[in-house]
Amino acid sequence: MNATRPLPLPPYGPAAGPEPAVRAGRASAWVPRFVVLLILCQVALLFASIGPFRILVRVAAFGTSLALLLLRGRGGRAHPAATAAIMVLVVVFFGLANPNTTNVTGGLAQAGLYAAVLAPLFWVPRLTIDLRVLRRTVMILWAFHTLSAAIGVMQVYRPGSFQPNLSSVVQGKGKGYVESLKITTATGARVFRPMGLTDVPGGAAISGLYAVLFGIGFFLTRRTPGIIAGAVASMGLGMMCLYLSQVRALLVMTGISIVAVLAVLAWRRDGMRLAALGSALAGMIVAGYVAAVSLAGPAVTRRLGTLVTSHPSALYYSNRGHFLQETLTEILPRFPFGAGLGKWGMMLSYFPGQPGEETYWVEVQWTGWIIDGGAPLTLAYVAALAVALWTAWGIARGRRGGGELPFWGAVVMAYGVGAVALTFSYPLFLGQAGMEFWLLNATLFAASRTVAPPPAPFVLHRRP
């Protein structure tokens, strides 16, 4: 038998089998609760009344992640990417000894941020996670991001409605920059790009991505008409929000993720699901575009037109590519082992160094890695991402979980492929989005450890 050939799964139909067996003991609710905390912290930032507590709200999610890492006992099988993640943390904490580190407080804060983002990779596998916990976690994220995408669409449909306060960081960049974040609707009104449940114009784009990806997950795994219809609607709403947000990097990331899911289905030779999902996605991509154009007209077509009228390399270079080139040709040769911690991002804002000290503006994740730890940090983090993708791929090509788990593996792997692509446009892994990436990968892995594989088929061997 060819060991690499995908094993058959239950047909895509109305019947749903029983929950697969899990280890003895009650499944942990820590992961869904943590996701709820992440959402509450994000929403709380939309209210000006939090005032002096704003910094505390920002660090609450990261601090909780670290607390869970310290307080949870040992146990469970470590995620395969844990070794590379430990190497990342070792390199980062060695960076505290770099003489160019801004100051001790800023360096410790930057190192702590790395630890908090990676922490779910360590504390989640120690918990008892089953398919229900995985599904509940994804459903909470799906509901929140679908709502955020819907609010983002309404912010364009009804200008002035559902509009949160603009981030003080964005306001501080000047009137001209703030005005550049607006689009002109089909009625002539000037509105911010959809913010959704964020305080940044265009911030709803990440919700559009999640609405599409998690909608795909429920479309593939649920068999009740209501949930399938909701998944299709979520995909269409997410695509519409992505078009209106005009964040081309996230739109490309969504496309890459969709192709990755379809490729997994093709590799599994699951023609029925491939045809059903392909048809649904094609319809929603077109419907989302038509609806977005009806709201914002030329603003959508002009922005999307740059993706096809310009050569991809020239388009990327003019937007983010020159930052990557500067990183590889100037910063890396100067600082092969890092330029010190606390030299960029929020930690620089909270813990500034001496006047005149050299600092950096980071637009792509690779710049952040090179500044914080040079080539060793970059190689270690890339290794961690590669192992995480390979682990998700291994789950996607298996048949554990009664047919459901492989599809969540495909969704998480597809999101991972898109996230790696996004590192060339955005410092994804030094914020809440990076922590969600490791949380999803760790939860998927933990669920795969507790799901009992189906019994091996009975084969009657004839005596020679």
Image (cartoon, rainbow, N blue to C red):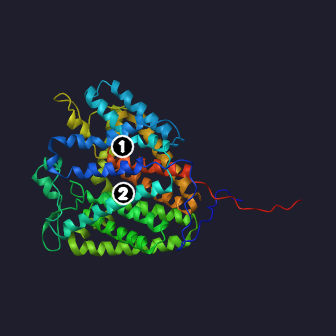
Mark 1 nearby-residue class (10 Å; few <14, some 14–19, many ≥20): many
Q: What element carries label 1?
A: helix
Three-letter amino acid code at the position of disc 1: Trp
Mark 2 nearby-residue class (10 Å; few <14, some 14–19, many ≥20): many
Q: In this view, does 81 lie to the left or right of 305?
A: right
Q: Residue at x 53, y 65 (%)?
A: 265
Is 340 located above or below residue 195 in the figure? above
Q: Are marks 1 and 2 in contact (CB under 8 Å)?
A: no
Residue 283, quarter of the rendered image: bottom left
Residue 452, quarter of the rendered image: bottom right
Q: Which quadrant would the C terminus be assigned to in this image?
A: bottom right
- The x, y position of residue 267, in whole percent, is 56, 63
- The x, y position of residue 84, in whole percent, is 48, 38
Q: Would you say residue 423 is visible in this rendering? A: no
Q: Which quadrant would the N terminus be assigned to in this image?
A: bottom right
Three-letter amino acid code at the position of disc 2: Leu
Compute the Cα span from label 1 to label 2.
27 Å
Is 50 located above or below residue 110 in the figure? below
- The x, y position of residue 106, in whole percent, is 26, 31
Q: Which numbered mark, 1 or 2, is in the foreground of this view?
A: 2
Residue closest to the eye, 184 or 200: 200
Residue named by callout 1: 366
Residue named by callout 2: 141
